[in-house]
Image (cartoon, rainbow, N blue to C red):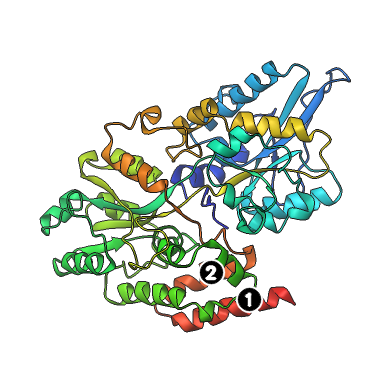
Amino acid sequence: MLSKSVKKLSIMVAILLFSSSLIACMKPSVTSAGTEAATTESTAASSSTDEQTLTVWLSAAFVNEIEQKSAQEDWVISGIIRDFEAQNPGVKVELTILADQSAAHQTFKAAAMSESGPDIINLWAGQPIFALKDVLLDLTPYVPQDDLDNIISWEAVRDGFSADGAILAYPTQGSDACGFLYNRAVLKSVGLDFDTNPPKTLDAFLAALETIKAAGITPITADDQGFNSLLTLSLASWWVQMVGSETIANESLGLQKFADDANFLAVIKTISTMYANGYINVDYSSSQDSFTRFVKGEAALMGGIGTNYVTLARNAMNPADVGYLNPPDFSSDALVKDTAIGGTGQCLAVARYTKNPELAVKFISFLDNKENQLKLLKMYPMLPIRSDITVSDLGWDNDAELKKAFEVGQRYSYWSDNSMVPDVASEYYSLGTLAVTGKITPEEYAAKLDEKAAELQQ
């Protein structure tokens, strides 16, 4: 599952590039966990017997590609850990970086069954942790009220997305508002101005795409990225804003039917029609260079992007030409309007077998506090997970595009894929690309997802 993050955490180009090479560059005092159960090399062999140790498994989302070139002690997360240890004498935090977060859920589950895993594990939020609730500690009694008041996306870590569901983890490491980049110069050449007159309705959006196409320019370029990024990141907001996360979760569990979801079918039909009409690059399913095409001015918009792409594009082209557009509302009947796919895809959970539950929560709370989140956001240009972090705190007062993303991120539609059980989400990715490109119909797509959901219940 993305995450995301995925993705999400994945989603971010820098992270994706980094995660594949992280282990080869890891410093000796940090261990790595991959598809096999992780082993943690103690860094406290000579410490006193009364020392409390927390073992923590984090993904590459906490150590970016710039940091990997420096000494481990210079990483932001290493500094945060040192600060925590200094404020809590007698506590030692052992850090492990996950080689493959997509495998972390099964790796952790296997380790948890024998109580040989970490105290704290970095997982994807939503359904991926709901499936692990038997081995996760219910954090409800431990979470301070201040954290409940100031951290966003708690719905993503409450069992079943329920407002009173057990808190299975802490949201962590950045939120997002996924949508489109647009090239001001290209739009101006065809008489469009998304700064002063962005398309706010589906009809207006489709009309703009037709205008761009008529000028001989590709309206939208995107790469599938293995998870159908155009749907999963940019346009799934159309579906989520119409039905909500609980409905999507129920469909993935076989409690409701994708085939009976008129909004799902309508959204998929709209996107496949966009592709058929030439509004999306014809090689979407195999493309790996949509970013290059966009920065060269070969397309007016780029889809399948997170907030970090604003900075990436500015660094690769004339920064004055880079604009951010959240998708228009799919319908005036939407439950949430003027929204984009977002929320946090990452979370930090505590193993049920931990001997130090209060200390584990104290560390996560410390990591998620305002001061430390601002440190991490300097390394990762995402949106904050805290409602008490402002545009001014981020230094974005005079940045119209990042302010725009920040504002829409306050009313995000939660990740559709994280709302599904992982096996159904995998079908959602692969079959979704076939549906977008017209290889299967929306009805066939829905039927296949229902088949997978039913299969999992047997």
Q: Nearer the viewer, residue 280 or 447?
A: 447
Residue 254: x and y in percent read 64, 75
Three-letter code for the amino acid on which mark 2 is drawn: Tyr
Residue under pointer 1? 452
N-term-proximal mark, 1 vs 2: 2
Whether residue 24 sits left or right of residue 403 in the image: it is right
- Residue 57 appears in which quarter of the rendering? top right
Residue under pointer 2? 428
Q: Residue at x 31, y 67 (%)?
A: 280
Q: Residue at x 25, y 42 (%)?
A: 317
Which quadrant does the N terminus fall into? bottom right
Q: Is residue 36 visible?
A: no
Q: Is residue 345 visible?
A: yes
Q: Is residue 311 above or below residue 421?
A: above
Q: Residue at x 27, y 57 (%)?
A: 301
Which quadrant does the C terminus fall into? bottom right
Q: Nearer the viewer, residue 429 or 244?
A: 244
User: Which labelled disc corresponds to residue 410?
Assistant: none
Label 2 secondary element: helix
Q: Residue at x 65, y 52 (%)?
A: 164
- Badge 2 local density, few (<14 within 10 Å), some, or many (20+)? many
Whether residue 102 sits left or right of residue 244 in the image: it is right
Three-letter code for the amino acid on which mark 1 is drawn: Lys
Label 1 secondary element: helix
